[in-house]
Every structure is written in structure tokens, then in C-alpha cells.
Amino acid sequence: MKQIRIIHCLALLTALAMWPLLAQDKAVPASVGATVPQDIPAVSVNYRLSPGDLIYVKVFQEDDLSSSLRIGDDGTITFPLIGTVKVGGLTVAEATKAIYLPLDEHYLVNPQITVTVLSFTDRHVTILGQVEHAGTYNLKEQSSLDILEAIGLAGGFTRLADTTDVMVRRLTDGKASIIRINARKIAKDSEASNFEVLPGDTITVQERIF
């Protein structure tokens, strides 16, 4: 009995000694003035990070590196040790890899990293031209949208629409580009590649020439 009591006492003393370390590990540090909310939103595996999104990057057992970071207008974050990292336009898994690789190569051995989206930026697309209800439409936080779904938000094509010529204006790293889409082909051909609409896109449906 005496031996059992001694073992129990040693176990209790060990647990008490380790408690500060366990409590420290549960604490979630934050930077850039952000806090980690209790109700973190669920994120689709296909969701691509956007400028203005707030993310939390945790490096296991490296609390000094774990940070809450706002993605800049150029799609980058500034992370301790490795500096500027481009994460805009990447999925959470891809962003995790983008941070992991330079850390693993230069600073840590096989770092364990998790990336969590804390909050989303305002996400919208503007749809103009030959659609029933032209205007600006908010997108759901984590959902993706293809070109036909975007046109559907605006009530669909008018009878004057040239469905073979849908123009998408997109800003990438501050530079505008124009992409032309044949929506009729996408709608009719199940094997045609679809086109994913991104937040900030301006979609213009041209008028058909008779």
C-alpha cells in the first residue's frame, strides 16, 4: 500500500509540474491586433484565399512564429523568419505548403503547420450588359462560382445576349486582364472546361449582332 501511495504522489507531482506547459500550449497567440474567435467558420477545401482574408498560421511548438495575419492587396503575407509569402489565390492546403517549404528548407526540421481562415473579406462580382438584372452581387464566403452560376445570379441572359462572347475583366497583382468566354459552348458541351469566377471580377455580356 505504501508503495502505491508513493506512485500516486509522484504521478500527481508530475502532472502539476507539467500543467504550466500544457496551459501554454493551449494558448493561441495572435498578432496584427487580431484575436482568434471561438466560432471559426468552416472552409471548403476548394476555397481560394483572397486579399483581405484574415488567417491564423500555427507552427506546432513554435509559439513565437504562430501569427494572425491579414492578406494584403497583392495577395501576400509577411511571416516571421521567411518574410513575404504569396498565399492569395491558393487553397488552404496550398498556402500551408507555401509556408512550410521555406521554413523546412532554411529554419526548422519538418515543421508542423496549420492554416485557419478566421474571417473573410467582402466578396463580390459585378455583372453588366445583356443580363436581366445587372449589378453587383455578394458571394458566399467560402463557395466557388462558375461563369454560368454568376450569370444566373443576375437573372440569366436577355434575348439580345451574345452568349458566345462573355467578357471577364480581372485584376491580378494590380494589373487588369480581359478574358473572353464562350458561355454557350460551356452550357451545351459537358466536356468543355468551365470557368471559375473570382471575387472582384467584372463580367460583361455582349449584345448579339444581327
Image: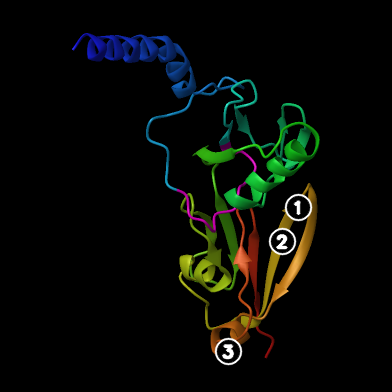
Q: Residue at x 42, y 29 (%)?
A: 37
Q: In the picture, residue 22 is in which quadrant?
A: top left
Q: Give the range drawn in magenta.
A: 43-54
Would you say residue 3 sits in the magenta stretch?
A: no
| Horizontal and vertical percent position of residue 74 | 74, 42
Which disc, if any, is residue 172?
A: 1
Query: Picture quarter containing residue 168?
Result: bottom right
Residue 169, labelled with which disc? 2
* Residue situated in front as seen by the camera: 81 or 107: 107
Which-is-in-front pick, marks 2 and 1?
1
Q: Mark 3 points at which residue?
A: 189
Front in this rendered view, residue 123 or 1:
1
Rendered position, 185 above or below 113: below
Q: Decide if residue 133 is on the left or right side of residue 126.
A: left
Quarter that holds the C terminus: bottom right
Give coordinates of residue 181: x percent, y percent. 68, 76
Kindly report which numbered mark, 3 or 2, lies closer to the viewer in this rendering: 3
Helix, strand or loop at mark 1: strand
Q: Do the residues labelled 1 and 3 touch (CB within 8 Å)?
A: no
Mark 3 / mark 2, whichever is N-terminal = 2
Q: Hey, what amino acid is under mark 2?
A: Arg
| Residue lying at 50% horizontally and 70% vertically, measured from the top left | 149
Q: Which of 52 and 202 is in front in this view?
A: 52
Q: Earlier in the sequence, mark 1 or mark 3?
A: 1
| Mark 3 Cα shell of 10 Å, populated few (<14), some (14-19), many (≥20) | few
Quarter that holds the N terminus: top left
The residue positioned 59% from the left and 82% from the top of the image is 186
Q: How far apart are marks 3 and 2 (CA)?
A: 24 Å
Q: Is the magenta stretch mostly helix, strand or loop?
A: loop
- What separation in Å lies between label 1 and label 3 (alpha carbons)? 29 Å
Q: Is residue 32 above or below residue 149?
A: above
